[in-house]
């Protein structure tokens, strides 16, 4: 059974760096085809894909946020970390990590999601 | 900023059939990549529902079906039930962006 759980601060000040951790179980991020992605959802708005990291350490980022995002993995700890620099109040959202189901480093779906963590950016 | 466009809302009476469209482009839905659909009940995380070729996780009823044609995709819900009241999102891989895109989301209301 695959599970994922997000953790991180609930309140961050503008211009600070946000660090979110996804701790997962039930699969290995070193297995061929495995991936973990981050998706966020501002209050009352749609889902927005942010980034994904694959078993082979390939990474993909949303073009609109690429300069502020970094995604890394620690296979031994079963964790994926997303860092967002220079946050703004518009980054206030629920942040989800999800298991990417697929066979290659493109395509696929997000078949299992964490419960999400709400992050507010405010001074 | 979503590149996949969905109607904001659809509604239907219990037992009816409703469809949700998802319009994209030649770099996402128009490619060989599958379109996937998610259901988000109020206050909960999204749940994977179905792919464009009708692959459903166990537990998803066959009242839900997906299809794709050209640069558009659709989710159909037949025999609409009160428990289907939720937000629905489509998702695909985009070759121009080298990443994933979600739709604008559709709220389904059961009258």
Image (spheres, coloured by chain):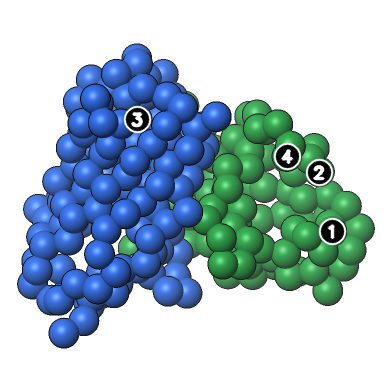
Chain colours: A blue, B green
Q: Which of the labelled discs sits on residue B81, or is there none?
A: 1
What residue is at 34 percent from the left and 36 percent from the top?
A36
Label 2 and label 3: CA atoms lie apart by 29 Å
| For marks 1 and 2 on the same chain, the one whose residue lies earlier in the sequence | 2
Residue B55 visible somewhere in the drawing: yes
Nearer to us in this view, B40 or B90: B40
Residue B96 sits above or below residue B84 on the image:
above
Where residue A117 sits, quadrant-wise, is bottom left
| For marks 1 and 4 on the same chain, the one whose residue lies earlier in the sequence | 4
Task: Report crowding for label 4: few under 14, some 14 to 19, many 20 or more residues within 10 A (C-alpha).
Answer: few
Q: Quadrant of the C terminus of chain B?
A: bottom right
Task: Report crowding for label 1: few under 14, some 14 to 19, many 20 or more residues within 10 A (C-alpha).
Answer: some
Residue B29 sits above or below residue A95 on the image:
above
Mark 4, secondary structure of its residue: loop
Label 2 and label 4: CA atoms lie apart by 8 Å
Are the numbered discs 3 and 4 placed on the same chain, yes or no?
Answer: no
Q: Residue furthest top?
A: A32
Mark 3, secondary structure of its residue: strand
> Which residue lies under the disc numbered 3?
A35
Label 1 and label 2: CA atoms lie apart by 10 Å
Asked if the residue under mark 2 is in contact with the one under mark 1, i.e. CB atoms within 8 Å, the reply is: yes
What residue is at 38 percent from the left and 36 percent from the top?
A24
Label 3 and label 4: CA atoms lie apart by 23 Å
Q: What is the chain identity of the residue bearing mark 1?
A: B
Q: Nearer the viewer, mark 2 or mark 3?
A: 3
> Which residue lies under the disc numbered 4?
B60
> Which residue lies under the disc numbered 2?
B63
Q: Nearer the viewer, mark 2 or mark 4?
A: 4
Task: Find residue B10 and report its horizontal and vertical position in percent.
Answer: 70, 67
Are the numbered discs 1 and 2 placed on the same chain, yes or no?
Answer: yes
């Amino acid at each position: 059974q695959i599970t994922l759980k997000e953790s991180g601060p609930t309140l961050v000040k503008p211009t600070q760096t946000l660090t979110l951790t996804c701790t997962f179980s039930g699969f290995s991020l070193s297995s061929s085809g495995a991936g973990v992605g981050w998706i966020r959802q501002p209050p009352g708005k749609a889902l927005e894909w942010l980034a994904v990291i694959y078993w082979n350490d390939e990474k993909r980022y949303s073009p609109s946020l690429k300069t502020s995002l970094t995604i890394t993995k620690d296979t031994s700890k079963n964790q994926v970390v997303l860092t967002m620099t220079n946050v703004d109040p518009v980054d206030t959202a629920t942040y989800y990590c999800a298991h990417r189901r697929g066979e290659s480093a493109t395509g696929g779906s997000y078949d299992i999601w964490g419960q999400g963590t709400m992050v507010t950016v405010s001074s | 900023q979503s590149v996949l466009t969905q109607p904001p809302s659809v509604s239907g009476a219990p037992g009816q059939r409703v469809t949700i469209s998802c319009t994209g482009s030649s770099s996402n839905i128009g490619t060989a990549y599958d379109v996937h659909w998610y259901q988000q009940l109020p206050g909960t995380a999204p749940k994977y529902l179905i792919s464009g070729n009708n692959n459903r996780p166990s537990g998803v009823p066959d009242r839900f079906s997906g299809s794709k044609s050209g640069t558009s995709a659709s989710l159909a819900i037949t025999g609409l039930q009160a428990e289907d009241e939720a937000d629905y999102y489509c998702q695909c891989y985009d070759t121009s962006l080298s990443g994933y895109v979600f739709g604008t989301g559709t709220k389904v209301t059961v009258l």
